[in-house]
Image (spheres, rainbow, N blue to C red):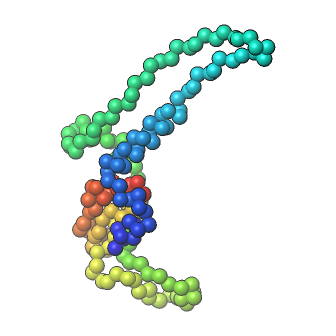
Amino acid sequence: MIEEEVQKTNPEENLNPDDLMAMWEAALKESQAASQPRSPEPSQEMTGETVSTSKKETTPTQPLTLQELTTSKEPETLQELDFILDIPLEISVEIGRTKMLIKDLLKLSQGSIIELEKMAGEPVDVFVNGKFMAKGEVVVVNDRFGVRITEILSTKDRVKRLGS
């Protein structure tokens, strides 16, 4: 249900990972081209005489070569990714939604019940940094609520959602 809503609102989401990678590479090339300094043009005096300028030597640049990522779990691969392992992520769980008018919202008081669209026992939605990533079921662990993950979006779907 959520996936259908997202696809309706964002047609770019239908890109496959190869197209997304090509877009990133094109943007990177544009960024590199824009950030390279330009050499000054030779100037002429107002009298019409040409001023001689010496050209500066430029360092030759080499094209950037990217290595293809692999899914191997070798120790050196994990060490390369260690720098991103400490990045904090916000995980939230949505048990349901509803729509209400302002006049109905103002009538709420302590003890009021808000009916949600989901049925009891239905899987809850798990979001990572606001992006839908998984489904799960609510559990109680040591008098606290928790979520047991029952279904995770495929890698392809997760990569598509990164661009949105």
Residue 84 percent coordinates (x, y): 36, 45
The reply to whether residue 95 is in sight is yes
- In the displayed structure, 24 sits above or below 5; it is above
Q: Is residue 91 visible?
A: no
Q: Residue at x 52, y 29 (%)?
A: 36
Q: Residue at x 54, y 88 (%)?
A: 104
Q: Is residue 61 above or below residue 49?
A: below
Q: Position of residue 122 (x, y in %)?
A: 28, 79
Q: Is residue 106 left or right of residue 16?
A: right
What residue do we see at 20% from left, 39% from top?
A: 74
Residue in front for this viewpoint, 121 or 33: 33
Quarter containing the C terminus: bottom left
* Quarter where residue 142 is shown: bottom left
71 to the left or right of 7: left
* Depth check, front residue: 41 or 122: 41
Residue 121, position as x, y percentages in the image: 27, 81
In what quadrant of the picture does the N terminus appear? bottom left
Q: Is residue 102 left or right of residue 10?
A: right
The vertical placement of 96 against 12, above or below, is below
